[in-house]
Image (cartoon, rainbow, N blue to C red):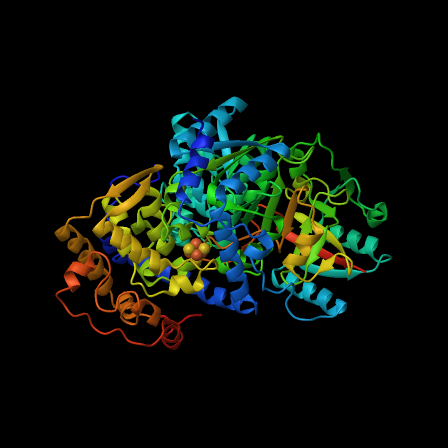
Amino acid sequence: MSSRERILGRVRRALADVTPDDRPYAEAVPREYLREHGERSVAQTVELLAENLADYRAVVHRADAAELPLLITRLLAERGSREVLVPAGLPPQWLAAAGPVRVHDRAADTAQRLDRVGSVVTGCAVAIAETGTIVLDGSPDQGRRRISLVPDHHICVVRVPDQVVSSVPQALERLDPARPSTWISGPSATSDIELDRVEGVHGPRTLEVILLG
Amino acid sequence: MTGTYLGMPAFPRAAHDAVRNPVLRGNLRHATHTIRAKRARAVGELSDWAALREAGRRIKDHTLRHLDRYLEQLEESVTAAGGTVHWAVDADEANRIVARLVRETGESEVVKVKSMATQEIGLNEALAAEGIRAYETDLAELIVQLGEDRPSHILVPAIHRNRGEIRDIFRSEMGAWGRPAPEDLTDRPADLAEAARLHLREKFLRAKVGISGANFMVAETGTLVVVESEGNGRMCLTLPETLISVVGIEKVVPTWRDLEVFLQTLPRSSTAERMNPYTSMWTGTTDGDGPRAFHLVLLDNGRTDTLADRVGRQALRCIRCSACLNVCPVYERAGGHAYGSVYPGPIGAILSPQLRGTASEIDASLPYASSLCGACYEVCPVAIDIPEVLVHLRERVVQGGPAVRQGNKVVLRPARGHAAERAAMRAARWAFSRPGALRAGQRLASRTRRLHPRTLPGPGRAWSDTRDLPAVPAEPFRDWWQRTRGGKDGVR
Ligand code: SF4
């Protein structure tokens, strides 16, 4: 007997005393929790996103389409990065004014190569106001998961209000489970040493979020 | 289960040593009180917490009741998405599978993200025996690994170490494992984190094989979810060419939508955050992004035996948030090591004896590592009635009875009367001779009064049959807790 058969057999024997429940799943699990917490206007939802991002120590900026290239240029200059990683589908105008050398996200680049790049600019799939979370799903304006991980400085552009939802349930509705996703709430952190929160262990130690709209 | 620490003293003895260690006790008190107060705030933000908790309980119960079906569905989805599924009846089989998969890549080192399941099966030691070096990459796990130590908390495994000790461990041990710590390393947490970042980065960048667990697996889609803070999880999940995830069979949930419950309750219950810094989700393999090969090892190792127990099976709902540890007056004073297992605290007291059986002295004594105060049940985000399971397991230790071990029905022999009394009284004497634990124990919540109105449960029964128990005060635990702030120390 294979281990698979053995385990499934054990499960079935273990459940022999349980009366079967053939109700549809939706009935078996009532969901009386809220789809979102509180009522907010669109502007208030964006405001809450900004607050919660900042609360977890992301640096929040706002810009309209005309201001965006200059803002990105300024942030990269302040950081002093010589190179910036660029996902293939990033709108070219976002970096139209940027000084650093663009390094395009290519499968052939090794992790060691990415480690020498100072900054990365990406879009996002959705942002969650209640938790201050941005979600990346590997779409062309976000690139492979590693490019927003290895560089120490991540600039993420969120289109507001279109990409902003209030809650976790609403975010999951928008995401495609087939795509790998990364949920980011503030910069990398640890509380492993006497529970002191320290920003930045392995992920980008600086996370800047630009609310574009 | 090979995760048993051999030669581990039974709980009361180990706890006795631990409570006499003032550094350990101070660290633990600071830690548990800090998290406890923060968690209450994070949970308080959600007005529908009770409904989320109930939904979480129902999702898990429904899944367990149809576990065979959901495991088969999961296997199908993961396979369709490009992954390979392996089944492991016990720790040895899981370790053999992982070692073989690593050998097939031709590599002799792997990077690991913290996973209770791989600790439970003793994977690192098994790999070492095959000449494969496993690097732990969580800061806390790194501290534990470098210090040749054992984790003492699910979430903060190095909770028993303070910053000075950590600096000393880094300075003396890092060099033997890779990039040494700087000579002038201070004990500032930020500097210690920086030293860990540099030490581990070279390992991440060259790693060809990553090993992880998972917090959730979605049957419908084949998606796995890892919840973390530091980014080492992301490194292990995305940089290597081969990813091997070892996951207990109880981690499956039916649908994608179910994540909306647990991604709200888990971070708030565990790290007391609205959301943890990083959550990674992946479904099989993705062309050009992340590992090219993905292996999922589904682990039984006592879980189906636990499932066979009508009362005890609810322990399989656990999402390992560690909230029950942080509110437990016994854990706060005894520390994680006294539980003799990778699962410490209240959840360990009900999980380890079920996964491993109650044949050993430590496992037979674990159901007594509690004052039945009920705080663990109140905070549990999937409403596991830990006191109920404890009482049930005590009865099983003392009275014996039917159980399932390694898939076979067995009848456990009762522990002999005097042995039972000794075990119970040793535990009771221990708990009730600590002023703090006593305070918690004396003020039993009304719901636990119901469980033992006149007699001590389990092995205590024979003893209390001939003795009167003091009446249990009626003040509910929570009222007392709020009024007295958990005994003595101010909660910040
Ligand atoms: S038993 Fe409940 S409170 Fe304890 S770790 Fe598991 S889920 Fe969390």
In the rendered image of this protein, does residue A55 appear above or below residue B295?
below
Q: Closest to the observer: A70 or B96?
A: B96
Question: Is any part of residue B217 visible from this angle?
Answer: yes
Q: Closest to the observer: B382 or A115?
A: B382
Q: Closest to the observer: B209 or A190?
A: B209
Quarter holding the N terminus of chain B is top left
Q: Residue at x 58, y 64 (%)?
A: A32
Expressed as whole percent of the image width and height from the top left, the position of residue A16 reads 41, 44
Q: Residue at x 38, y 53 (%)?
A: B347
Figure quadrant of residue B287 = top right
Q: Closest to the observer: A31 or B291?
A: A31
Expressed as whole percent of the image width and height from the top left, the position of residue A210 reads 74, 57
In the rendered image of this protein, does residue B286 appear above or below residue B129?
below
Give the total number of marks visible in the rendering. Answer: 0
Q: Residue at x 28, y 70 (%)?
A: B439
Question: Is any part of residue B272 visible from this angle?
Answer: no
Expressed as whole percent of the image width and height from the top left, the position of residue B223 reads 60, 42
Quarter holding the C terminus of chain B is bottom left
Q: Residue at x 24, y 60 (%)?
A: B457
Q: Is residue A102 left or right of residue A197?
A: right
In the rendered image of this protein, does residue A187 appear above or below residue B93?
below
Figure quadrant of residue B129 = top left
Q: Quadrant of ligand 1?
A: bottom left
Q: Is residue A173 left or right of residue B382?
A: right
Expressed as whole percent of the image width and height from the top left, the position of residue B242 reads 57, 30
